[in-house]
Image: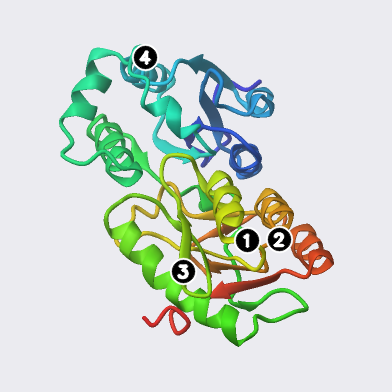
Amino acid sequence: MNAHPQKGGKVIGLIAGGRQFPVLVAQGVKAQGHRLIVAGFTGHTNPDVYPLADASRELKLGQLTKLLDFLKENHVEQVVMAGTIHKPGVMDIRHFDARAVKVLFSLKAKGDDAILRAVSGVLEAEGMALVPPQRFAQGLLTPPGVLTRRAPDEREWTDLRHGAELARALGRLDIGQCVVLREGIVAAVEALEGTDAAIRRGCELGGPGCVVVKVMKPGQEERVDLPSVGPDTVRVLAKGQGVCLGVEAGKSLFFDLEATVDAADRAGIAIVGLTQQDLGG
């Protein structure tokens, strides 16, 4: 592989998690003529991203000094974060180095957004600009309006609006982005377990007919950790006999949109890209 980016290109560091997103970002970085440096984490990162890199290293979660050294050794100019991290793994600090522990325990609150903002600050203090991953994987933002053949009925719209209000309140506390409810009664809120597990639990408790709402946290760092949905979201919702999914339009990522909508149509699930008007903003 080339030791240097193409003329006009930059050296992009990708901090990669799991699932499809880091691979799409990596492909976009290379397509735009940049040199790609990938840092991954054992047990978290999608291994398909490594062959796309000009240089890569797999670390244990929490090895912040080694991460920074690796990025600086490769003269990284901009950093992008993409992909899921198994959240309970963040609670295991046995492998955290001294710098990571210092960052973690300097935080009054330790929600996702607070931790990501702190890591972002460390990267930028080292002279590496943090850029949004959607710059390299365009076309993934959720479009507005009803996306499925079936639109939500009146009851589902009521739950969508109420759920969005609750999810925003949850987000202000930096707890999670997703709420599961039915007939105005909350069955589950997302915390450390992640969206799919929250939907699974919510549908078990709420029974058939649940509505799922996922929105961006108010004031959330938009360069990292945007809300995301995709085929797995609908698969879990359908298995739990849920009936409707609302996700914030323009501020959330929607993977495999066409295939996911097709699957929702087959299951009779309504999907809506919620606008500010829908959210009462």
- 279 above or below 55? below
**Mark with earlier residue (2, 3):** 3
Residue 115 drawn at (x, y percent)? 30, 38
- Image side of residue 174 versus residue 241, left or right: left
| Secondary element type, mark 2 | loop
Identify residue for label 1: 207
Residue 71 drawn at (x, y percent)? 40, 23
- Mark 2 nearby-residue class (10 Å; few <14, some 14–19, many ≥20): many
Identify residue for label 2: 241
Asked whether the beta carbons under mark 4 and mark 2 sit within 8 Å of each other, the answer is: no
- Mark 1 nearby-residue class (10 Å; few <14, some 14–19, many ≥20): some
Asked whether the beta carbons under mark 3 and mark 1 sit within 8 Å of each other, the answer is: no
- 36 above or below 1? below
**Circle nearer the viewer, 1 or 2:** 1
Quadrant the N terminus occupies: top right
Identify residue for label 4: 66
Residue 134 drawn at (x, y percent)? 53, 53
Name the residue furthest right: 266
**Mark with earlier residue (3, 4):** 4
Q: 204 and 228: which one is in front?
A: 204
As shown in the figure, which amino acid type bears the numbered disc 4? Lys
Asked whether the beta carbons under mark 1 and mark 2 sit within 8 Å of each other, the answer is: yes
